[in-house]
Image (cartoon, grey):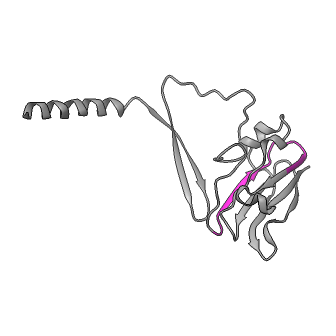
Amino acid sequence: MRYLGMSVLAASAVVLGACGGGEKKGADTTVTTDSVSTTTTAATTPSSSAAPAAGAATAAPITGKTYDVKMLMDDKGYRFDPATLTVKAGDGIKFINVSGGPHNVSIDPASVPADVRPQLAANFPNPTSEMSSPMLVNPNDSYTVSFGNVKPGTYEVHCTPHMAMNMKMSVTVQ
C-alpha cells in the first residue's frame, strides 16, 4: 500500500512538472484608473507567430489635446458632460466616472464606417469587447480613448449599463 501511494505521488509530480514549462510570457498590459489597476499577461508559445489580423491597426497615440468628459448621474439623469464634443484627429478624450457608476465607454461597431473601425478599435486600450472599455466602478476612475488616425466623422458613444436611460454622446472628429 505504501508503494502504491509513493507511485501516485511520483506520477503526480511528473505530470505537474510537464504542465509548468515551455511557454514564454508576453508583455504585460495594464489598465490604470485613479483607484484601480488591472494587469494581465499574455502567454505565447515559441511556435506561434503574432501577425496582426487582416485590417488590424495599432493604437495611435494622442498627439493633440485631451478633453475631459464627466460621466454623471444627477438630477438631470444619467449623462455625459458635455453630451457633444468636437475634436481633431489626434486628440484624446478622458472619460471620468463622477457619480452613478458603474459606467463604461462604448461605440457600436456597426455604426462606424468599415474603413475606420480597425483604427478606432485599436485606440481602445484593454477593451472588454470591440470598442468598449472596462467598467469604471469608483468615483474618479477614468478611461482615455485616442482619436489618433481616426478619419473625420461623427461617432456615437454610449454607456452600456445606462444606454436605456439615454446616456449617450456624440463625438465629431474634424
Q: Does the magenta stretch include residue 143?
A: yes
The residue at 84%/51% (across/down) is 156
Q: Is residue 136 above or below residue 41?
A: below
Q: Give the range drawn in magenta.
A: 139-155
| Residue situated in front as seen by the camera: 67 or 96 | 96
The residue at 79%/66% (across/down) is 79
Residue 102 relative to residue 47: left or right: right
Q: Which corner quadrant holds the N terminus?
A: top left
Where is residue 173 drawn, in percent x and y?
A: 88, 50
User: Residue 32 appears in which quarter of the rendering?
Assistant: bottom right
Seen as rendered, the residue at the extreme top is: 47
Seen as rendered, the residue at the extreme front is: 164
User: Residue 165 appears in which quarter of the rendering?
Assistant: bottom right
The residue at 74%/61% (across/down) is 162
| Residue situated in front as seen by the camera: 146 or 96 | 96
User: Residue 144 appears in which quarter of the rendering?
Assistant: bottom right
Q: Is residue 35 magenta?
A: no
| Residue situated in front as seen by the camera: 148 or 127 | 127
Where is residue 107 drawn, in percent x and y?
A: 78, 49
Q: Is residue 152 above or below residue 160?
A: above
| Residue situated in front as seen by the camera: 93 or 129 | 129
Where is residue 95 drawn, in percent x and y?
A: 73, 60
How many marks on residues?
0
Residue 3 relative to residue 66: left or right: left
Where is residue 16 drawn, in percent x and y?
A: 30, 34
Seen as rendered, the residue at the extreme bottom is: 75
The residue at 85%/63% (across/down) is 83
